[in-house]
Amino acid sequence: SSLEGHTDYVRSVAFAPDGKTLASGSDDKTVKLWDAATGSQMSSLEGHTAQVLSVSFAPDGKTVASGSVDSTVKLWDAASGSQMSSLEGHTAQVNSVAFSP
C-alpha cells in the first residue's frame, strides 16, 4: 500500500522499534507518523521552516528526531505528536539524525 499525505518529496523514513509506526520526513516541512499496519496517517508534526531531511526513532520508540534544512534538530513526542524541543546552533542544514542505543 502507499502512504499518501505529503505534498512534496519524501526524504527519509524510519520504523519505530516495535514496527508499528512509520515516520516520514518531507520537503513539505513536515514529519508524518503512520500506522504501519493500516497505512493511515496518525499525526502531522509541524514546526520546521524548511525541508526535513532525516527522521529517526529513539530506541524506546517514544521520541522522534528530525533534522532539517532550517539547521535545527527537533524532538517530538511520538504518542502525542507535540514538539518537545528544538536543538539550535548548527550553521548549515542537518542531513542526518540518529539515536545511540
Image (cartoon, rainbow, N blue to C red):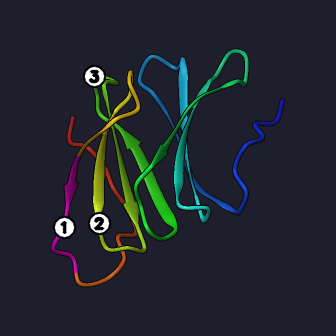
Tag shown at residue 60: 3
- How far separated are the C-alphas under marks 1 and 3? 24 Å
Where does the image place residue 2, in percent across and percent down from the top left? 81, 36
2 and 3 marks in contact (CB < 8 Å): no
Left or right of 56? Residue 86 is left
- Dot 3: element: loop
- Dot 1: element: loop
Displayed quadrant of residue 47: bottom left
The crowding category of the residue bearing disc 2, from other C-alpha atoms within 10 Å (few below 14, some 14 to 19, many at least 20), is: many
Q: What is the magenta range?
A: 85-90
Three-letter code for the amino acid on which mark 1 is drawn: Glu
Residue furthest left in the image: 89
Of the pair 47 and 90, the residue shown nearer to us: 47
Among numbered discs 1 and 3, the one appearing first in the sequence: 3
- How far separated are the C-alphas under marks 2 and 3? 22 Å
Three-letter code for the amino acid on which mark 3 is drawn: Asp
Left or right of 28? Residue 5 is right
Where does the image place residue 82, in percent across and percent down from the top left? 34, 35
Q: What residue is shown at x 31% (from left), y 83% (from top)?
A: 92
Left or right of 82? Residue 8 is right
- Dot 2: element: loop
2 and 1 marks in contact (CB < 8 Å): yes
Q: Which residue is mark 1?
A: 88
Where does the image place residue 89, in percent across and percent down from the top left? 15, 74
Magenta-span inclusion, residue 89: yes
Three-letter code for the amino acid on which mark 2 is drawn: Thr
